[in-house]
Image: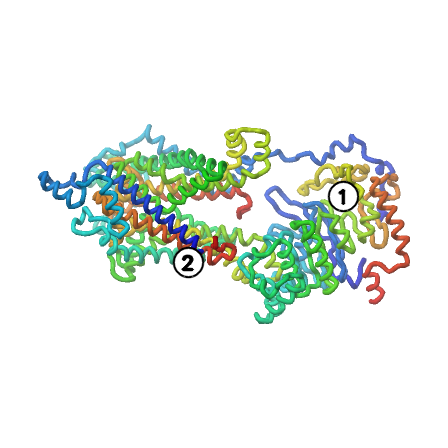
C-alpha cells in the first residue's frame, strides 16, 4: 500500500479522550491511505471513531482529546506535529471539510457571499472585490441559481440543500487537495441527498480533489466511493475497493451492515439488524471487540485480537474467520448472493478498463 | 413594520391605561386622606381644599378628569409642594436621572460585553474564574451598599470625586459607578454564556475549518453573533437601573426622579407617586419598544414585516 | 500477517458456545444506571463553589432560625447606656474584636468607658440604641431567608401553574395569558411593590404580597416555553393517545421534565426577592421598627459609617454573602442540570 500517489497516510493512530469517567479509547490503532483523486468512504456506526479520525486530520479535536500515538503524513509532513498556526494555514487551503448539518454550519449573521469568499481572503490575501467575484463563480459552480442576486442573502433565506451547496462552495473555493465530508447528506431529504452526492462527484472530477467520505449509510457509499474502510469500536475491521466490500465482504460486521441495508429484493421480509450495542470504549473488551455481537464468533475472538488477513492486494479484513485453522462458516444468504455477483463481476471486468486509478497508475 | 409598530404602540397605551387606572383606584381606597397628617383644619377649610383638588366630585368624575389630565401630561398637584404641578416636579428632575441612568447603562453594558467575552474566550482558565467572580459580586452586592462604599472610600477618603450633590460630570462619576455595577454584571454573565454557546456552534467549527485563526474567529463570527442577543436584556437592565437610582440618587443627593419617588413615598404624596409610577412605566415601555425594533434591525433572521 | 496464528491450537478456532457467550453479553450495563436527578446531583457535588455555598446557606438557615431558641440577647431590647459599643469577642485581643475603638487618634476601651459590667460582651457590637448587632443580624437573616421561602412558594404555586396552563392549553387562552404577562412585564417590579406597600402599609405582610405578585412572572414564561416544547414530544403524545387525562399527564409526565427549569429559575428568583426586601427596608418602607431586617440594619449603620463602620459592614457582608451564595448555587445547578451548557 506504500505508494507515492498517496496524498495522505494515517499510521497507527491512537486517540484517547480524558473524561470524568476515565480514559475513553476512541481510536485504537487506525491506519489507512488516501490516494490522489479517489474517494475513500469510512463507514461505521455512531461512536465507531469515524469523526474523531477526520477531526484529527483537521487538527480540530476537542481539547480533552489526547493523541496517544501514530502519524498523519500529508505531503511528507506529520500533521500531528504541526503547531496551531501551521494547521490554520493548511485548513481551508489544502484540507477542507463539509459538516453534517447545513442548517447550523453557516454563520446566521453573515451574508453568504462573504462566507464563501472568506477562505480566499484568509489564505490568498485576496482583495474583497476579487474574492467576491470568485465566490460568485463558486456559487454558480455548485448550482445556486440567480447567484448574482443571492450573493447578498443570509443563510436563513436558503433551503437545507442549497445551504449544503454553499458549504461545499466554501470548502472547495480554494481547490483543496483533500475534502473531508462528514455525513454531508445525513440531515437532508433523500432527493436532495442524491443531488448533493452528484454535485460532489461532478466537482471531484473537475478539481481532482481526494475525498474522505464519512457515513453510516452504506447505501450512499455504493455510488460515491472508490474504496471503503469499515470501522468498528475505534478500529478499521475491513477495507477494500467498493466492489470488494459490497460483493465480497469477509468480516462478519460488514456482513451485518450489508444485511441491514434494504435492497430491491428485501421487500416484505424483515430487515435483519446487528444485535446488541457497540462495546464500552472506556474498557475495550479483550480480543475482538465485535465478538459479543458476532454470530460467527470463535473462541479465539475472546482471547486475541485478529490481525488483518489479506484477501486481495487491495482487500484486507481483520477476522479470525480468515485464518486457515478457522472452520468454514456459511455467511448469510444475502452475502452469498453478493459473492456470486462478485465472481461474475470480476470475470467480466478482467479485460475491461474499470477503476480510474488503475489508469492513473499506468500513466505515472 | 408599520403594522407591527401600531400593534406595539397600542399595547403600550393599553399598559399605561391599566397602570393609570390601577394606581388611581389603589390610591383612592387608601385609608386616610392627604389631610390626615395636617394640623387641625376647620370643616370649611377642608371643604375648600377638597374643592381645590377636585376631591368633592363623584369618584368616576375624578377618575375621568385624572385620565384626561394624564393624556395631556398633567398629573395633578403635589401634596408635598402644594403649589407645584406633579408634571413640573417630574420634568425638572428627569434630566439628572436620565444622565446617570444613561451613563450607567452605557458604561455597564460596554464593560460587561468586554469582560464577558474575555471570560468566554478564556473559558475554564483562571481568567474565566476571575471574571466570573467579579460578575457574581456585581450581581450580588446591593447597589445601596456599593454606593455607600464608593462615596466613603473614593469620595470622602481619597477625595477623587465629590461625595454628593449635582453639578457637572465629576458629580456623575460615583453614582454612575454604583448604578453600573448591576448592568455590568448581568451583561458580563449573559455575554459569557452566549459567547460560550456561539463558540461551540457548528458555524464556528466551519470557520475553523476555513483556517481562520482564533482572533479572526472571534472578531468575524463569534462577537457579532453573541452581541445581538444582548439587546434583549437592555429592558430588564433599565428596570435594574430605575430601581437602583432610587437609593443611589438618595445617597448622593441627586435631584432626580428616583430621589423624589422615595421622598414622595415617605411623605404619602400620592399624586407624585402616581405620576412617577406612570412615568416609570412609560420609560420602560419605550425602552422595550426601541430594543425590539433594534433587535429586528440588527438580526438578519428577524425581519419585522408582519 | 496470517503467520502469527500458528501459535494457537485448533481448539481456539471452535465457534463460541452459548456458555462462553453469556459472559460476553454486550448489553450488560457495567455502571449502575442513574436517574436524571441523581446524575445532576453528582455533577453538582463536583462543583466545589456551589457546594460551599450550599453549606453556607444551610448554616445560615440553622443559625438564623435556631437563634430564636437560644438567643444571647434580645434583638429588640434597647440599652442606651451600652449604645455604639464595638465588637468584643472574649479572649480575642485583635483591634476590631476587643471592644476598643479609635477616638480622636487614641485607641480607647469603649466598654470600660460605658461602664459595662466586666462580663459584658457583644460579639458584633451594639447599635445606636444599644441593641446587640449580632442578634439583630441573625433576625434580619431570618427575615431574608423567610422571604426566600415565600418567594419560592409563590414561584411554584403561581408561576409553574400559570406556565403549565398557558403552554398546555394553547390557543386563545395562551394568547390571553401571554398578553397579561407582557403587560405586567412592562411595569417595573418596584413600582408595583411600592404602590402595594403604600396601600397596605409597610410591613412583612405587604412585602410578602408584593413579592407574590411580582416574582412569578419569569417562572411562568420559562415553564410555558418548556411546556410548549415538551407538549409535542412523543412521550406526551403517547400518553395522550393512551387516553390519560390532561391533569395526570401534567403531573406524571410534564412536571418531572420541567423540574430542571423550575429548580434553576427558583434559584434566580430567590436572590431577587431577598434584594427587594432589603431594598424596601433600606428606603424605609419595608420591615418596620423595631424589627430588624438586613436592609434597615444597613440603613442605620450607614449613618455612622464614618465612625463606627462595623455597624454597616457586618449586615452588608451577611446580605452580600446570602446573595452570592444563592447566585453561585443557582449557576451550579444550571450547569448540573444542563450539562451541555458550557462547563464540563
Q: Disc 1 sits on a residue from what chain?
A: A
Q: Position of residue A298 (x, y in %)?
A: 82, 38
Seen in the image, is C121 located left or right of residue C318?
left
User: How far apart are the two marked residues, 1 and 2, measured between alpha carbons?
Assistant: 58 Å
Seen in the image, is B94 located left or right of residue C181?
left
Query: In the picture, residue C287 is in which quadrant?
Result: top left
Q: Is residue A76 above or below residue B272?
A: below
Tags 1 and 2 both on a single chain: no
Q: Position of residue C5 (x, y in %)?
A: 85, 44
**Which dot, 1 or 2, sits closer to the camera?**
1
Query: In the picture, residue C325 is in which quadrant?
Result: top left
Task: Pick whichever, A182 or C324, lies toward us.
Answer: A182
Task: Pick whichever, C146 or B226, lies toward us.
Answer: B226
Task: Pick whichever, B129 or B60, lies toward us.
Answer: B60
Quarter of the rendering occupied by the N terminus of chain B: bottom left
Task: Pick whichever, B305 or A100, lies toward us.
Answer: B305
Q: Disc 2 sits on a residue from what chain?
A: B
Asked if residue A82 shows in the view, the reply is: no
Residue under numbered circle 1: A262
Seen in the image, is C33 located left or right of residue C67?
right
Asked if residue C33 shows in the view, the reply is: yes
Residue placed at 40% from the left, 51% from the top? B8
Q: Label 1: state its secondary structure.
A: loop
Question: Mark 1 Cα within 10 Å, few/some/many (few <14, many 20+)?
Answer: some
Residue placed at 15% from the left, 46% from the top? B52
Q: Position of residue C47 (x, y in %)?
A: 50, 42
Residue under numbered circle 2: B110
Q: Position of residue C93 (x, y in %)?
A: 31, 42
Amino acid at each position: 500500500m506504500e505508494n507515492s500517489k498517496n496524498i495522505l497516510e494515517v499510521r497507527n493512530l491512537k486517540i484517547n479522550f480524558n473524561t470524568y469517567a476515565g480514559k475513553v479509547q476512541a481510536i485504537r490503532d487506525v491506519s489507512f491511505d488516501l490516494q490522489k483523486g479517489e474517494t475513500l468512504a469510512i463507514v461505521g456506526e455512531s461512536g465507531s471513531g469515524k469523526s474523531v479520525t477526520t477531526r484529527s486530520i483537521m487538527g480540530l479535536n476537542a481539547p480533552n482529546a489526547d493523541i496517544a500515538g501514530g502519524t498523519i503524513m500529508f505531503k511528507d509532513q506529520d500533521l500531528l506535529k504541526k503547531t496551531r498556526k501551521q494547521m490554520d494555514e493548511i485548513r481551508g487551503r489544502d484540507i477542507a471539510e463539509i459538516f453534517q448539518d447545513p442548517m447550523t454550519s453557516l454563520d446566521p449573521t453573515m451574508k453568504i457571499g462573504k462566507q464563501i469568499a472568506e477562505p480566499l481572503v484568509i489564505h490568498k490575501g485576496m482583495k474583497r472585490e476579487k474574492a467576491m467575484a470568485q465566490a460568485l463563480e463558486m456559487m454558480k459552480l455548485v448550482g445556486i441559481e440567480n447567484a448574482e442576486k443571492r450573493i447578498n442573502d443570509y443563510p436563513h433565506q436558503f433551503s437545507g440543500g442549497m445551504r449544503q451547496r454553499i458549504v461545499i462552495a466554501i470548502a472547495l473555493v480554494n481547490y483543496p487537495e483533500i475534502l473531508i465530508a462528514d455525513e454531508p447528506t445525513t440531515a437532508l431529504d433523500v432527493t436532495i441527498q442524491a443531488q448533493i452526492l452528484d454535485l460532489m462527484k461532478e466537482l471531484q472530477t473537475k478539481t481532482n480533489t481526494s475525498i474522505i467520505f464519512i457515513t453510516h449509510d452504506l447505501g450512499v457509499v455504493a455510488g460515491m466511493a472508490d474504496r471503503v474502510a469499515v470501522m468498528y469500536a475505534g478500529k478499521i475491521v475491513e477495507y477494500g475497493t467498493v466492489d470488494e466490500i459490497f460483493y465480497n465482504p469477509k468480516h462478519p460486521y460488514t456482513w451485518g451492515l450489508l444485511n441491514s441495508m434494504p435492497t430491491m429484493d428485501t421487500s416484505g421480509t424483515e430487515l435483519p439488524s446487528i444485535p446488541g450495542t457497540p462495546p464500552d470504549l472506556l474498557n475495550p473488551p479483550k480480543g475482538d471487540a465485535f465478538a459479543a455481537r458476532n454470530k460467527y464468533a470463535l473462541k479465539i475472538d475472546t482471547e486475541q485480537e485478529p490481525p488483518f488477513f489479506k484477501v486481495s492486494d487491495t482487500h484486507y479484513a481483520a477476522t479470525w474467520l480468515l485464518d486457515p485453522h478457522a472452520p468454514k462458516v456459511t455467511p448469510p444468504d444475502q452475502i452469498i448472493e453478493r459473492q456470486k455477483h462478485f465472481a461474475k463481476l470480476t470475470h467480466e471486468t478482467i479485460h475491461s478498463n474499470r477503476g480510474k486509478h488503475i489508469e492513473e497508475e499506468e500513466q505515472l | 413594520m408599520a403594522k407591527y409598530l401600531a400593534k406595539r404602540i397600542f399595547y403600550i397605551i393599553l399598559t399605561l391605561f391599566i397602570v393609570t387606572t390601577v394606581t388611581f383606584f389603589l390610591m383612592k381606597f387608601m385609608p386616610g386622606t392627604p389631610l390626615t397628617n395636617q394640623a387641625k383644619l376647620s370643616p370649611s377649610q377642608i371643604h375648600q381644599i377638597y374643592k381645590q383638588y377636585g376631591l368633592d366630585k363623584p369618584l368616576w368624575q375624578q377618575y375621568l378628569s385624572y385620565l384626561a389630565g394624564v393624556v395631556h401630561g398633567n398629573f395633578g398637584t403635589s401634596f408635598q409642594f402644594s403649589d407645584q404641578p406633579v408634571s413640573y416636579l417630574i420634568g425638572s428632575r428627569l434630566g439628572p436621572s436620565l444622565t446617570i441612568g444613561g451613563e450607567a447603562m452605557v458604561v455597564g453594558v460596554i464593560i460587561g460585553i468586554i469582560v464577558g467575552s474575555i471570560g468566554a474566550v478564556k473559558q475554564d482558565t483562571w481568567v474565566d474564574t476571575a471574571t466570573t467572580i467579579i460578575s457574581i459580586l456585581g450581581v450580588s452586592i446591593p447597589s445601596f451598599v456599593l454606593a455607600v462604599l464608593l462615596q466613603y472610600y473614593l469620595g470622602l477618603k481619597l477625595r477623587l470625586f465629590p461625595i454628593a450633590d449635582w453639578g457637572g460630570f465629576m458629580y456623575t462619576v460615583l453614582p454612575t459607578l454604583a448604578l453600573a455595577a448591576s448592568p455590568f454584571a448581568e451583561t458580563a454573565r449573559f455575554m459569557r454564556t452566549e459567547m460560550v454557546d456561539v463558540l461551540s456552534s457548528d458555524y464556528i467549527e466551519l470557520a475553523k475549518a476555513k483556517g481562520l485563526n482564533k482572533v479572526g474567529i472571534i472578531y468575524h463570527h463569534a462577537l457579532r453573533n453573541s452581541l445581538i442577543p444582548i439587546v434583549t436584556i437592555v429592558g430588564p437592565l433599565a428596570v435594574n437601573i430605575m430601581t437602583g437610582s432610587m437609593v443611589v440618587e438618595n445617597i448622593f443627593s441627586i435631584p432626580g426622579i428616583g430621589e423624589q419617588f422615595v421622598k414622595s413615598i415617605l411623605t404619602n404624596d400620592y399624586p407624585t407617586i402616581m405620576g412617577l409610577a406612570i412615568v416609570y412605566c412609560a420609560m420602560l415601555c419605550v425602552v422595550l419598544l426601541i430594543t425590539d425594533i433594534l433587535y429586528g434591525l440588527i438580526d438578519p433572521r428577524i425581519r419585522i414585516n408582519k | 500477517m496470517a503467520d502469527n496464528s500458528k501459535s494457537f491450537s485448533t481448539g481456539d478456532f471452535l465457534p463460541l458456545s452459548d456458555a462462553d457467550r453469556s459472559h460476553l453479553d454486550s448489553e450488560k450495563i457495567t455502571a449502575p444506571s442513574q436517574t436524571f436527578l441523581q446524575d445532576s446531583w453528582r455533577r453538582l457535588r463536583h462543583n466545589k463553589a456551589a457546594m460551599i455555598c450550599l453549606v453556607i446557606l444551610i448554616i445560615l438557615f440553622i443559625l438564623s432560625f435556631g437563634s430564636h431558641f437560644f438567643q444571647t440577647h434580645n434583638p429588640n431590647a434597647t440599652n442606651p447606656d451600652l449604645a455604639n459599643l464595638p465588637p468584643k469577642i472574649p479572649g480575642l485581643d485583635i483591634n476590631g474584636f476587643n471592644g476598643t475603638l479609635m477616638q480622636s487618634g487614641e485607641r480607647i476601651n469603649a466598654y470600660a468607658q460605658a461602664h459595662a459590667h466586666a462580663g459584658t460582651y457583644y460579639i458584633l457590637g451594639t447599635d445606636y440604641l444599644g441593641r446587640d448587632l449580632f442578634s439583630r443580624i441573625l433576625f434580619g437573616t431570618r427575615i431574608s431567608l423567610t422571604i426566600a421561602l415565600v418567594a419560592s412558594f409563590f414561584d411554584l404555586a403561581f408561576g409553574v401553574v400559570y406556565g403549565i396552563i398557558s403552554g398546555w392549553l394553547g390557543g386563545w387562552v395562551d394568547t390571553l395569558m401571554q398578553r397579561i404577562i407582557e403587560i405586567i412585564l412592562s411595569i417595573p417590579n418596584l413600582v408595583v411593590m411600592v404602590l402595594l406597600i403604600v396601600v397596605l402599609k409597610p410591613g412583612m405582610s405587604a412585602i410578602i404580597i408584593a413579592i407574590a405578585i411580582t416574582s412569578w412572572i419569569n417562572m411562568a414564561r420559562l415553564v410555558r416555553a418548556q411546556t410548549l416544547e415538551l407538549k409535542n414530544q412523543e412521550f406526551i403524545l403517547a400518553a395522550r393517545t393512551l387516553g390519560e387525562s390532561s391533569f395526570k399527564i401534567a403531573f406524571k409526565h410534564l412536571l418531572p421534565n420541567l423540574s430542571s427549569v423550575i429548580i434553576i429559575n427558583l434559584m434566580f428568583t430567590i436572590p431577587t426577592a431577598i434584594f427587594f426586601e432589603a431594598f424596601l427596608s433600606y428606603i424605609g418602607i419595608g420591615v418596620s421598627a423595631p424589627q430588624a431586617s438586613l436592609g434597615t440594619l444597613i440603613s442605620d449603620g450607614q449613618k455612622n459609617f464614618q465612625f463606627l463602620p462595623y455597624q454597616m459592614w457586618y449586615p452588608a457582608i451577611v446580605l452580600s454573602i446570602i446573595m452570592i451564595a444563592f447566585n453561585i448555587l443557582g449557576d451550579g445547578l444550571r450547569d448540573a442540570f444542563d450539562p451541555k451548557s458550557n462547563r464540563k
